[in-house]
Every structure is written in C-alpha cells, then in structure tokens.
Amino acid sequence: MVFNLSDTPSIGNTFIAELRDQDIQRDRLRFRRNLERVGELLAYELSKTLDYAIRPVETPLGTAEVQLPQNELILATILRAGLPIHQGLLNYFDHSANAFVSAFRKNHKDGSFDVHVEYISSPRLEDKTLIVTDAMLATGASMTLAVKSLLEHGQPSALHIVTAIASTDGLNYLQRNFPDAHIWMGALDDELTAKSYIVPGLGDAGDLSYGEKTPD
C-alpha cells in the first residue's frame, strides 16, 4: 500500500510547499517544524489502518465507550535528518517505544557511494508494528539497509515506512525489497540527480534542519 499526502488537496500542501521554498528554508526552526507537521499528518492517516477495540472510559459524569488502538508500535528513524518527522509521529503515537539507526553515505571519487550503518538502538520487534521514518527517500538504499538492520531485532507483524518526499526510483526500490510494506509520503518526485538528490526535492534535509556538516 502506498499513501501520498499530496494526492488530495489539504493543509499538508502548505507544509510541503514551505519545506521546498528556498527562502523559507533559511528559518531552521520553521523547516524542522514543517517536517514535524508532515509527520503528524501522516501519523493521523496511518492511525486509520491500525487495529481498534472498544474500551470504557470513566468521565466525571458517566462512562464513554471509545475505540482505542491496540497495536504495540515501535517508531524508528534514521539519524539525523529523520528526527523532526520522527518527532511528528511521536507527538501522536506518544506511548510508542523507539529505535534509532545511524547510517551514512561513503562517497567515492567516481561519484558512487555506499551506505553504512554505524549504530543501532532498538527494542525487540517481534509481533510489533514497526514504523520507520526518514525525511527523504532518494535511492531507497539507506532506508533498505536500516530496515534490514532493524529486522535483526525480530520480525514485526507489520512494516510502515514514512517520509516527507520520495523519488519514484526510491519508492520502486523499496517495494522490490519489502513488497508487504506500507509506504506513507508527503510528496512523490520523479527525478534524481547524478549524486542521488531528489529533483525538485528540497535539498539536504539534515543540513537544513541542523546546519551544514563537514564534507566526507
């Protein structure tokens, strides 16, 4: 299943537009908050697919019957760019456990690169609902490696992948590697540059959120 927030007109289009706008991007706080907002909207949409059961809730005046989610959620993200959108989901799924993956590109002189996982912190995933976030899904290589590393901690009952902007190539790559995954995105772009940046995309989400890093 693939869900694209931009397929339907909503306030989400405003957040995506501001994420892409190179003038608004100069405000790092607003950029991070817009990623967080996209995460919140996608969390809401994702919540509609969870399992629910009716539970009684005692109010000062009586008892209300409420449908409450039953899934045990694990929210995982790829450092560092994934942190704001991860926070957006955590704002809604605030009882979730969390996992973190540190992955980086090792660039080569010929313009190619390899993705390496440097660090992972995760609870057991067996029979849990795993939700993995990253700000961008370009080639899909980092996300694929991160998910495979997480799966060493157990087999979840369901896998969801959440991103603000994906490329068509990255989406296809993920679907080949994880055909049963549910993929949630803010927008889908068709083009990748030779250095695997999404076009039109929005630039480097990690740098825009937290400042430029030293080159490899």
Image (cartoon, rainbow, N blue to C red):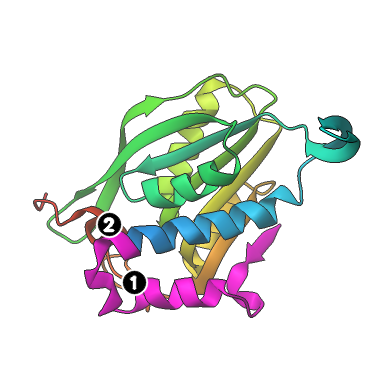
207 drawn magenta: no
The residue labelled by disc 2 is 209
Q: Nearer the viewer, residue 56 or 171?
A: 56
Q: Position of residue 137 (x, y in %)?
A: 44, 58
Q: At x 47% / y 62%, what residue is drawn? A: 164
Residue lying at 46% horizontally and 30% vertically, measured from the top left: 99
Q: Which residue is mark 1?
A: 202
SS for tag 2? helix
Picture coordinates of residue 98, whole percent (x, y): 49, 30
In this view, the residue farthest toward the front is 61
The residue positioned 91% from the left and 38% from the top of the image is 65
Dot 1: what SS? Answer: loop
In this rendering, does residue 139 appear at all? no
Decide which of 92, 180 is in the foreground and name it. Answer: 92
Identified by mark 2, the residue type is Ser
Mark 1 Cα-neighbour bin, 10 Å: few <14, some 14–19, many ≥20: some
Q: Which residues are magenta?
A: 1-30
Q: Residues within 10 Å of mark 2 (few under 14, many from 20)?
A: many
Compared with 41, 67 (above or below) is above
Q: Nearer the viewer, residue 102 or 174?
A: 102
What kind of secondary structure does the magenta stretch mostly adopt? helix
Q: Is residue 90 above or below residue 152?
A: below
Q: Looking at the image, is mark 2 or mark 1 earlier in the sequence?
A: 1
Residue 135 horizontal/vertical position (percent) = 41, 56
